Image (cartoon, helix red, strand yellow):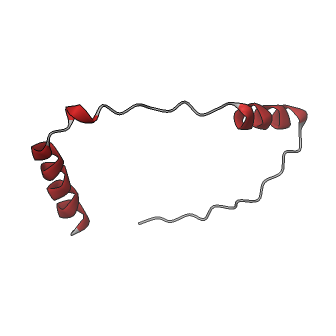
Amino acid sequence: MATSSFNKDFTLNIKKAVESFERIISTPNKSIKIDKSLVSAEKEQRGEQKLKQILSR
């Protein structure tokens, strides 16, 4: 499996990059509403079983 490292240090060295970064930071996150009534207990249990099966490999 290939791995890569991520360097958290970055430099905004051009005006366009600074403006773009400011726009991203100042834009509020849109919260996503999840309709929990769509998930039955049976579907939730089946999903848990699938996840356990995938992670046990």
| Relative depth, front residue between 32 and 4 | 32
> Which residue is at a point 56% across and 63% down the rendered structure image?
4
Q: Quadrant of the N terminus?
A: bottom left
> Which residue is at a point 83% across and 51% down the rendered structure image?
11
Residue 44 located left or right of residue 10: left
Compared with residue 16, is residue 49 higher up or lower down, i.e. above or below? Answer: below
Q: Which residue occupies the extreme front position in the image? A: 37
| Relative depth, front residue between 33 and 3 | 33
Residue 15 in the image: state x and y as whole percent: 90, 34
Residue 26 in the image: state x and y as whole percent: 74, 33
Residue 28 in the image: state x and y as whole percent: 65, 32
Residue 28 located left or right of residue 36: right
> Which residue is at a point 27% across and 36% down the rendered structure image?
36
Residue 53's quadrant in the figure? Answer: bottom left
> Which residue is at a point 89% across and 44% down the rendered structure image?
13
Residue 39 located left or right of residue 32: left
Residue 30's quadrant in the figure? Answer: top right
Compared with residue 19, is residue 52 higher up or lower down, i.e. above or below? Answer: below
